Amino acid sequence: MSSLSDFLALSDIPKTAPFRREDIPVEVVTCDENERLSRRVFDNLKAAQAAFPGLDLFHGSPGFTWAMRGEVDGKIAARFESTAAYKSLSQ
């Protein structure tokens, strides 16, 4: 094998993190003007993007972080935080 990409192509190693899939639940955390956090859960990325068009599994957007590992009902989920929620949770 000549490169890491050749090795990965032949291996069983997942090519992306399990929470970066479009078919798993999505958790979106936002913060209102009074700094109260709220959480909404969607069945999948498409449903979440209908409510929050800026969501992207691999890139942050002006209003949201990129996908992080989250959990919904004990199962893995994609978690997005609004910029305000991220700042509030990071303090």
Image: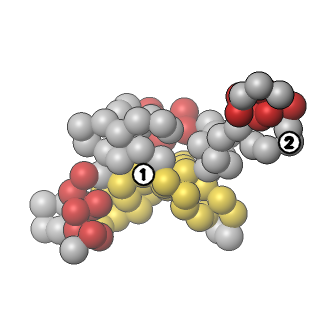
State the residue in front, 21 or 38: 21
**Would you name the residue on which mark 1 appears?**
80
Residue 60, image x and y in percent?
A: 35, 39
Q: Residue at x 85, y 38 (%)?
A: 11
Q: Is residue 88 visible?
A: yes
Q: How is the image coloured?
A: secondary structure
Q: Residue furthest front?
A: 2
Q: As shown in the figure, which amino acid type bears the numbered disc 2? A: Asp
* Of callouts 2 and 1, the N-terminal one: 2
Residue 26, image x and y in percent?
A: 54, 50
Q: Residue at x 41, y 44 (%)?
A: 66
Depth check, mark 2 against mark 1: the one in front is 2
State the residue in front, 78 or 60: 60
User: In the rendered view, does 81 fall on the left or right side of 40?
Assistant: left
Q: Residue furthest bottom?
A: 91
Element type at mark 1: strand
